[in-house]
Image (cartoon, helix red, strand yellow):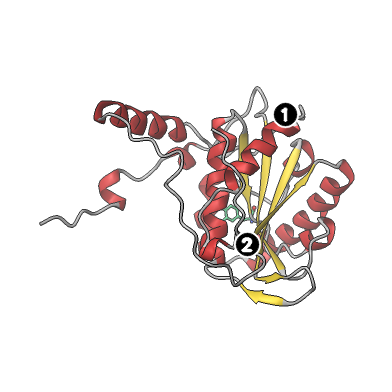
Amino acid sequence: MKIPVKSVASPMTGKAKLVLEPLPAYREYPAVEMALRASEFSADIARRRTVRDFDSRPVAREVIEQCLLAAGTAPSGANQQPWHFAVVTDPARKKRIREAAEAEEREFYAGRAPQEWLDALAPLGTDPNKPFLEEAPLLIAIFAQKYGVRPEGGKFSHYYVPESVGIAAGFLIAALHHAGLAMLTHTPSPMGFLNQICARPSSEKPVILLVVGYPKSDCQVPVYAGIKKPLQQFTSWLES
Ligand code: IYR
């Protein structure tokens, strides 16, 4: 269903007034179908694994754009949508990102990380080498907009930025997985170099570098990363 564009002020202009509309496009499913949909989604998203070994085959731009559109529907503080997604396919930029990330990671693994952190990472087999940053067909640098900038240049506050960007990143990961793509949520630390390489302003903070593509045919993943907590361990119900 096509959602018509509303003639209401955009979240960027501020001082917008409340205008209501009937809830568009909501669907209630019969109970059996609801249960089936819930379990099917759960099983499908549970198939996602973090991949570090990518084939170089390119991914259609239209697919990525649809996944980004899905991410852009995420709820956010005051609907300010305080995120920016920079898609990098340019080999020269990917190379620069790899070099900058590996320089940081070499320091991280050679002393910056406390032993407790290194012990926590041991079952994942990570190290300072990040060939996937060049091998994968695309990188999506996710930026959090610490504050908004009006077209004329004035600043305005953004609210719940980390939460909002985290939710949008989750939507993007789910959309990419749903489309049949593999990914890695990479967090080189610090990753300020992404502003320069991706030509983003200092009002934005890079938070996740998503590495996206097809897994190599002989791709292996750590068993440890596939072990998820059972429901009782991470949920509680407070019933009468
Ligand atoms: N950024 C480093 C270390 C690292 C940290 C965490 I927390 C991970 O879940 C995985 C890796 C790296 O990318 O190797």
Query: Label 2's element?
Result: loop
Instruction: Bin the neighbour count of mark 2 within 10 Å (Cα to Cα): few under 14, some 14-19, many 20 and up.
Output: few
Residue 47 position within the rendered picture, expressed as x and y whole percent measured from the top left: 47, 31
Up the image or down, 232 lies above or below 101; here it is: above
Residue 90 position within the rendered picture, expressed as x and y whole percent measured from the top left: 86, 42
Q: Is residue 28 left or right of residue 99?
A: left
Q: Which mark is residue 12?
A: none
Which quarter of the rendered picture does the C terminus lie within?
Answer: bottom left
Q: Inspect this view and state whether residue 139 appears.
A: yes
Q: CA distance from mark 2 to mark 1?
A: 44 Å
Q: Which mark is residue 55?
A: 1
* Quadrant in the picture for residue 82: bottom right
User: Which marked residue is nearer to the observer: mark 2 or mark 1?
Assistant: 2
Which residue is more in the foreground, 181 or 186?
Answer: 181
Residue 97 position within the rendered picture, expressed as x and y whole percent measured from the top left: 80, 52
Q: Which mark is residue 9?
A: 2
Amino acid, disc 1: Asp
> Residue at point 75% right, 39% down?
138
* Quadrant in the picture for residue 35: top left
